[in-house]
Image: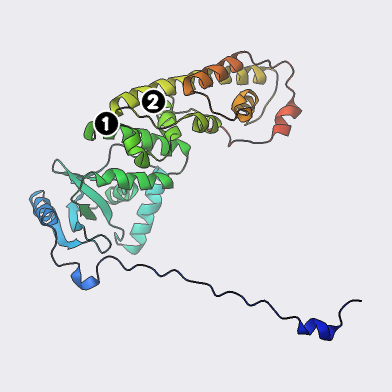
Amino acid sequence: MPPSSKDAKQVPKKRKSPVRRRKTRVRGLPPAQLLEDVPAEAQALAEAIRTDGGSPLVAYRDPLGGHGVVLAALPLDKVQPTPYQRDLSEPHVRRLASAMTRVDRFLDPLIAVRHDGQYWTPNGNHRLAAARFLGAQSVVALVLPEPELAFQILALNTEKAHNLKERSLEVIRMLRGLVEVRKGTELDVAPLLEEPAFVTLGAAYEKRPRLSGGAYQSIVKRIDGFLDESLTEALAIREERADAVLKLDDAVSAVVERLKSRGLTSPYLKAFVVARINYLRFVKTAPEFDAALEKLTRAAERFSVDKVRQQDIRASGPPEAPEEG
C-alpha cells in the first residue's frame, strides 16, 4: 500500500553536508613593501636602461615572488620581438592600431628582457607592430633582469597561438633559440616546448609552409616524445622526423590527386586517406617513430583508389579541419 501524503511528509530530509572552502595560503608582498629592498640586479638594470636611451620609471619588487622588475619607457627602435615567436597577423595589427587610436593611449605594457643593448619582447609582437604602425616613439614595458624568463613567457604564449601551424613554428623556433643559450637535453626543457608533436611539426612547417599538419597531428602525437639527447642532437633528430612526415605527406598527396582524377571531391580528402591508412588506432603500444612513419608511408604508396566511392568519403565525416593553406 503506497504511503499517504501525511507519511511522506514525515520522511526526514537528508541534510546537505557543509561545503568546506579551502583556505588560501597568503603569500607575496603587501603594497607598501614593493618599493623596499629592491634587488640589486633590478637597480642595475634601471641604470642600463637609462644608458640605452630609455627612461626607467620605477624599479620595484614583483608582488607575488618579490623578484625585481623595472617599469620603463623604451625607445621603440630598440625593441624587437624574440626571434622564435609566431609570425605577425596583419589584420590583428590593424585592429590593435585602431583600438589604440580610439583611446589615444598605450595601456598594455610589454614584457621585455635586455639583450646586447636592445630589448626583446616575448609577448608583445602585435602591440609593438601596432605602435610602430601609429608612429609611436616609445613604449612602456615591464623589463625583467633575467633574460631566460623570455623562454618561459613565450611557452605560456604558445597556448594562445591561433592555430597548429603558428603554435608549432613558435615551438621549433624556441628550441633553436635554446640551442644557443642552454645546455642539457630536450627533456630538460620539455615544459617550455609543451608537446613533442609541436616540435616535429614545427620543423616540418619550416620546410613546407603549406603542410596540412592537422591531418598528421594525432599520429605524431601518438608516437612522438621528448628526447633524452642534447639540444643540438635533438634538433637534428627533429629535422629527420620532419623529413619523414613530409615523405608521408608526399605519398598521401599522391593518393589525393588520384582520387581527384576519378572525380572524387571533398575538402577532407587528405584526412580521409590518413584515416584509412592509420593502423595506430588498432594497436595498444605505440611503435617507434621511424618505424611507424615508414609503415604509414608504405600503406599510402599501396593505397588503391579504385574501390573508393564518394559516399565513402561523405560517410567518413570531417575527422579533421579542412586543408590548411
**Residue at 55 percent of width and 30 percent of height:** 215
Any part of residue 87 in sight = no
Q: Indicate the secondary structure of the residue bearing disc 2.
A: helix
Relative placement, left or right, of 45 versus 246 is left
**Residue at 62 percent of width and 23 percent of height:** 277
Residue situated in front as seen by the camera: 19 or 255? 19
Q: Indicate the secondary structure of the residue bearing disc 1.
A: helix
**Residue at 43 percent of width and 20 percent of height:** 243
Q: Toward which corner of the image does residue 17 lie, by quadrant? A: bottom right
* Above or below 64: residue 135: above
Q: Where is residue 50 drawn, in percent x and y?
A: 9, 53
- Disc 1 marks which residue? 179
Residue situated in front as seen by the camera: 265 or 116? 116
**Residue at 54 percent of width and 33 percent of height:** 218
* Above or below 92: residue 102: below
How many residues crowd mark 1 within 10 Å: few (<14), some (14–19), many (20+)?
A: some
Q: Where is residue 150 drawn, in percent x and y?
A: 27, 45
Q: CA distance from mark 2 to mark 1?
A: 13 Å
Amino acid type of the residue that numbered disc 1 sits on in the rendered structure: Val
Relative placement, left or right, of 91 versus 84 is right
Extreme bottom residue here? 6
- Disc 2 marks which residue? 238
Residue situated in front as seen by the camera: 13 or 26? 13
